[in-house]
Amino acid sequence: MASNITTMQQPSMAPFSLPISVSAQVGIVILTLAFVLGFPGNLFVVWSVFCQVKKRSVTCLLVLNLALADAFVLLSAPLFLRYLAGGRGWEFGTAACKLVHYLSSVNMYVSIYLICLMSMDRWLAVSRPFLSQRMRTKRSLLVLLLVVWVTAFILSLPMPFYRSNLKKTFSSHNVTLNFCIPYHWGSMGHQVFQYIFETVMGCLVPFSLINTCYASVICRLRSAMFHRRGQGSRLILMIICAFAIFWLPYHIVNVIEVAGMLQGSKSVTDAARVARPNVTAFAYFSSAVNPILYVFAGSSHIRQAGLSFMGKLFEATNSESRSTSFTRSGRNSSPDESSALHALSVKLGKPFKSKSKDRSYSEAGKEAETLGSVQQLD
């Protein structure tokens, strides 16, 4: 994340500390809430997936990776809090300055592209059910997850190059402080590249893919027998909305600052730079909000399951994924699909009839049974 939050180091022996500005106070509140709520919350999600979920769906494993990424980046919160609240400057060196911002950028890309995978999985389950079943293997999922993480690390490479630990001397107190700030070697081209690159690869491209997937899903479900959304679909939509709410202001500031630089408007550029620390802290809070969403989504399981409620929520996404695929495949299936469904029915120990009235009765019964299971999930 390209932030204008400044950080400093005090080599002088004179007792000197920077005053805490209003912007810094807001940042302290946001970062404290993010760490207190988000770090244990994401660890609870990880524990629930590993210890409470027996059959992990694709959505469940993607949520696990999202929680790991969020918990990891929240470990940098104490460093930022030390800077904001202490007023003693950045005391952790140039390497830490570059590393924490690099990891924050990795978290942004990992989060949005994991959400893309969730959307694509939902699209495949509805529009290409048999292909979805063939692709839902542990090996294919591990490959996709590896691609997401490697892509995030690669896309974040510009961040450490555009972050530097610069010195500033306060002559009135005879103190030299270090500022961990964006640094583009005085080149407007580098600034434009960084902010546009972040907005295109971290917002426009993934959200275009997400919107395309869900537009197709909505069109498909209009002709389906049921129109209710299961818990998995609602959970994914909540994650998407939360990410958009917390990250869109950051990308909007990117666009505003680039527009100000290209137009030569100093007032617009300064306004964007003033807003950047607050929208950066606001985006940082996105790493803490997902566990809160899971609590609301799984609230119906809390009374019965207690601390295992999140495991019940994630197990429901597995049941829903299977029900959606079989319900879609049961309608107007081709001979090849019928034979495949027959093979599946043999494995499940259920008879399958493929001709005339017997077939229609069998399909109607399966659709009714599937509809009932989806309604129970809701």
Image: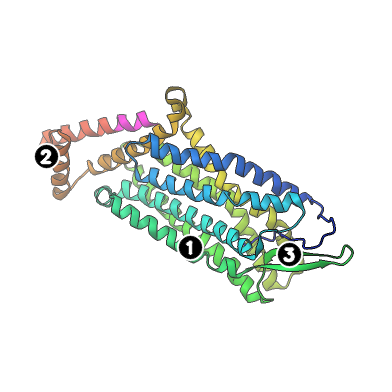
Kind of residue indicated by mark 1: Phe
Nearer to us: label 1 or label 2: 1
Q: Quadrant of residue 142?
A: bottom left
- Please tell me which of labels 3 and 1 falls first in the chain: 1
Q: 120 or 225, which is in the foreground?
A: 120
* Residue 40: % across, % down: 54, 39
Q: Is residue 136 above or below residue 43?
A: below
Q: Quadrant of the C terminus?
A: top left
- Please tell me which of labels 2 and 3 falls first in the chain: 3
Q: CA distance from mark 1 to mark 2?
A: 50 Å
Q: Residue at x 44, y 63 (%)?
A: 151
Q: Which mark is residue 153?
A: 1
Q: Main secondary structure of the magenta part?
A: helix
Other residues around mark 2 within 10 Å, as few (<14) / some (14–19) / many (≥20): some
Is residue 91 in sight in this rendering? Answer: yes
- For the magenta stretch, what is the residue range? 371-378
What secondary structure is marked by label 3? strand
Kind of residue indicated by mark 2: Ser
In the rendered view, does 111 fall on the left or right side of 162? left
